Every structure is written in structure tokens, then in C-alpha cells.
Amino acid sequence: MSKVGFYSHNDYLKHKTGPGHPERPERLQYLTQHLKKTDVFAGLTFLSPSLCDINRIKQIHPGNYVENIQNACKNRSHSLDSDTVVCEDSYETALLAAGAVVDACDAIVEGALESAFCAVRPPGHHAEPAKAMGFCLFNNVAIAARYLQAQHSIKKVCIIDWDVHHGNGTQSAFYDDPTVFYLSIHQHPLYPGTGLADEKGQGEGAGTTLNFPSPAGFSDREYLQMFENDIARAVSKFKPEFMLISAGFDAHQHDPLANMNVTEEGFARMTQVVHDLSKEFCQGRMISVLEGGYDLDALSRSVEHHLRVMLK
Ligand SMILES: [Zn+2]
């Protein structure tokens, strides 16, 4: 069995967002078809996720929020905000997305896998504990961080978020928590508008949030400079036991929702930095969770390059 797991499921296609919505089922269909044509495919262990236990979701989201999402789907409310939409199957799909990341935590801690990529929908990093937004319902990566701590006695978790948008939801979940280090590099100004350099955490969590708001036009070179210097230095100081990546690929030069100039080679080199840090501090234990990425071809090729580094 390969040491790198790939979690996905056909039921992720059931979360239907409607015509013209960038976060569409085709993202995962195209990605899977693309990977099948590459050498990466044979190296991965394909795994089917289970539905996440509601109690795991409730470690990040209040019970009434979870019920509201469930009811909105049951009642086919469609829009939760201007760009976050649900259909009848979205609640279960969101449970399956969080379930993939939680399953990956178990498999890695138990030693069946070293690392994993979760090709899930809907994404999660904009979901605040009590507010769905930015295409996100449940915060998959935040649920995983808390699960690792609650279930597997892992004390310090690092979340690196290179999606081109700031992960406001993840930041909110751990803003006063010194045990989860949240780092984000994102285009600024851009949706959702948070993630300024002076947002560094509060109370006991002061210093364990780090934001790199970056102007449009940054390319591989500027990203790499930040990863190899500031990010590597900050993570080395924190010494995490487990590494999570909020892996959005919408900083790609061809992405329609943002204006960065990262290439798939750039994503590979960023992966290498994080992979090296996970080897140094976390015994290689790392889970990468899909967030954004809206150009089908750019997304698929970027994930291919990302996985190739994880497989090394
Ligand atoms: Zn994004």
C-alpha cells in the first residue's frame, strides 16, 4: 500500500451549486480524469471516506448551526449567502467532506498512511464556527485539527493555508488558541477582506496566527521566498506534531477568481517546503485538504504536481 492516501467519493458530485457557479462538481470529475492519465495515479492509495460523526463537527461548529445547515438543505433553501448555496444533498456531502479528513487523521496516526490528500467538496476554510460563507459549510481542516487533539492526543497542529483567499473561518476557530498555528498567504485586497498582517491571534493565542496579505501579481518567486524564509522559520519555532494544508489552487495564474501568477511548478515547490517541515517535525504526518481552484485544467495539473512531491 502506498504511503500517500487519496480520499474522494462520487457523492461529492451531489452538492449541486447551480449554473455558472465556480465551485462545481466538474472540478472533481476533471481532476480524477486527469490524474488517471498521469504516473501519479499508480502511486496513490485510493480510499473512500465515511460520513463524519456529528460530534466531531460540533467541536468546531455549535449544534444549532449544524441543525440550521441540515434544515436549509432539507427545505431546499438554496442560498445561505450571496455565493454559498446548498441543495437537498449538500448536508450529507459536507459530512462526507469532513469525514474524509477525519478518516485520514486516523489512518495516518495508526500508521497505515504517512500522508493524505482529500479531494473533497464543499471546501471549508471560509466557514466560521457559526456562519456559512464563501462556498463553505463545515470547516474541514479545523475539524481535523480539533479531532487530532481530542482523539489522538496530538498537542500542536500547524495549518498552512495557501488558498488565494484568506481562511477567515479557520483563523476564527483558533484565534485565541496557542495549540493550533494558523498561517495564511493570500491575495489582499480580495474576498473575504480579513487576514491583515496585524491579525496575529489574541490572548493565549497571540502569536499563533500569521498572515501574509500579498498584492495581486505575486508569482512563484515571491511565494517561494515567503515559504522558504518566513513560513519555514515560524513553523520551525512552533514545532508542530501534525501538518495540515488548506490546499486551494486558485493562486494559479489561470484561475478566474484571483490575480496571482503561481504555476503548478510553484505549487510543487511550496509542497516541498511543507513536506520537508512535516518530515522534520511531524514524522511526515501531513494532510492536504482541497479548498479552491476554479480553472479545471490549472487545478488538475496543480494537484498532480502537488501529489508528485508528496509521493517522493
Ligand atoms: Zn479560494
Image (cartoon, helix red, strand yellow):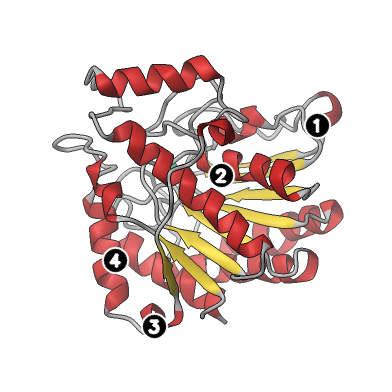
Task: Classify mark 1: helix, strand or loop.
Answer: helix
Please give the residue where the numbered disc 4 appears in the rendered image: 32
Residue 311 versus residue 185: which sits nearer the camera?
Answer: 311
Please give the residue where the numbered disc 2 appears in the rendered image: 141
Q: Amino acid at mark 1?
A: Gly
Residue 56 lies left or right of residue 28; in this view the side is right
Q: Residues within 10 Å of mark 2 (few under 14, many from 20)?
A: many
Distance of label 4 from label 2 (alpha carbons): 21 Å
At horizontal 56% and vertical 44% (from top left) the residue drawn is 141
Distance of label 3 from label 4 (alpha carbons): 13 Å
Q: Amino acid at mark 4?
A: Thr
Residue 43 versus residue 178: which sits nearer the camera?
Answer: 43
Please give the residue where the numbered disc 3 appears in the rendered image: 42
Please give the residue where the numbered disc 1 appears in the rendered image: 205
Task: Classify mark 2: helix, strand or loop.
Answer: helix
Residue 82 lies left or right of residue 207; in this view the side is left
Q: Is residue 225 visible?
A: no
Sooner in the amino-acid sequence: mark 3 or mark 4: 4
Sooner in the amino-acid sequence: mark 3 or mark 2: 3
At horizontal 47% and vertical 39% (from top left) the residue drawn is 124
Distance of label 1 from label 4 (alpha carbons): 39 Å
Indicate the position of residue 306 as horizontal and vertical percent values: 48, 69
Indicate the position of residue 270 as horizontal and vertical percent values: 58, 65
Q: Amino acid at mark 2?
A: Val
Which quadrant of the rendered structure holds the C terminus? bottom right
Q: Residues within 10 Å of mark 1 (few under 14, many from 20)?
A: some
Q: Amino acid at mark 3?
A: Ala
